[in-house]
Image: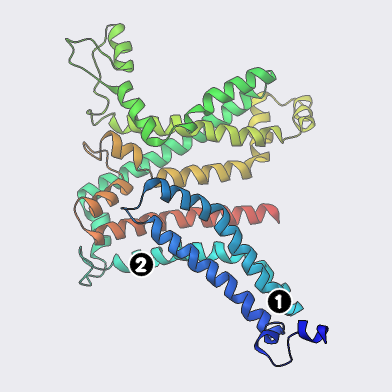
Amino acid sequence: MQQQLQQPEKGSFLSWFTTGVGRVIVALIVPIITFAILWQSFVFMRDTEAPKLLIALVALVVGVVGVWALYIGTNFFIEQLPGRVRDALRPYLFVGPAMVILGVFLIYPAIGTIYLSFFDARSESFIGVQNYAFAFVDSAMLIALRNNLLWIILVTGFTVSVGLLVAVLVDRLSQWEEAAAKSLIFMPMAISAVGASVIWSFMYFAKPITQPQIGTLNAIITGFGGEPVLFLLDKAINNFALIAIQIWLLTGFCMVILSSAVKGVPDELLEAARIDGANEFQVFFRILVPSIMPTILTVSTTVFIIVLKTFDIVYVMTNGRRDTEVVANRMFNELFRFGNSGHASALAVVLLLAVLPIIYWNLRSLREQRS
């Protein structure tokens, strides 16, 4: 009699939850509720009038506990399904959120941007490819495209070449000397592009010739008897002055990645080449470089993409004035300064189309090397 009281009667509402269908429904409700709580938390964090400390606390809880709870709840739901279905769906439990985030925050905005690029400044009237004609015909845009090409060639070429050269040279130092050299060269990577721009603005600062120079470079130049150089005002050198900042920032990144690849080349292979009579240049160009070519391609592609969308340095230093405009900075100005969403969208699509062939070429090269 007591056992009958403890067990739910057959056909009752409580016993229904112990069946397969009931357990699946209950398990489905858990992640839905968790997702609803997370969504409301995101809405709350966007409230500009909410206390900042409370927003930070909610963000911490959501970022750590909320995502963990969502995974646990979803996994609990999958555990209630039949064996074949469970095994088929389990991989998507971990890949699914990333795909959703990728679709919402990357694919959907990309499609929306392409759509808006065919409309006028207020996104009201369809104007066809006029925005793209502006991107390749307007005189200011031609300067921006020229500057972007200059940035890509110089920054990618210098950072990868110098990074590889430094990686090879420091590999011959003692352990502590190598660590010290790499730390100094990599240190600029810890500085944001905005911070680096502020630092170099003091380096380039120039006063009238009759006054003492407080800018580092002009202080050195005038100390040797020269005249102050207007690094950011002279159109002949201002682009190179901005490019030097990006090279200073990225060389350490290239050096660290390429140094790891250099250390992966067997010493026996290099010694065998030297024994066969190869000099250091032949060892470098015919043995070392081909051995680490996949890493060089990867680093070059990464630097290419970073440079193609460069914005911070130009915006902080000159904001595109005196023929220093680049595409990303012009895109920002078109949208937030001139209020022309059509031009801004077209420029964003141009940047996207410029990146896609490089990514495709890189992936194809990696597949060929693996095969």
Residue at coordinates 29% horizontally, 17% vertically from top-left? 215
The numbered disc on residue 112 is: 2
Q: What is the residue that sits farthest to the front in this orientation?
A: 1
Q: Is residue 139 left or right of residue 290?
A: left
The amino acid marked with disc number 2 is: Gly
Q: Contact, CB < 8 Å: mark 1 with mark 2?
A: no
Residue 150: quadrant of the picture? top left
Query: Considering only vertical position in the picture, is 23 above or below 260?
Result: below
Residue 46 can be seen, yes or no: yes
State how many labels appear: 2
Q: Secondary structure at mark 1?
A: loop
Q: Name the quarter where the N terminus is drawn.
A: bottom right
Q: Is residue 21 above or below residue 143?
A: below
Residue 8: image location, x then y, percent:
73, 86
The residue that label 1 is drawn on is 80
Residue 297 occupies quadrant? top right
Above-or-below relation of 29 to 211: below
| Left or right: residue 266 compared with residue 33 | right
**Residue 54 at what x, y percent from top left?**
42, 49
Left-right relation of 331 to 156: left
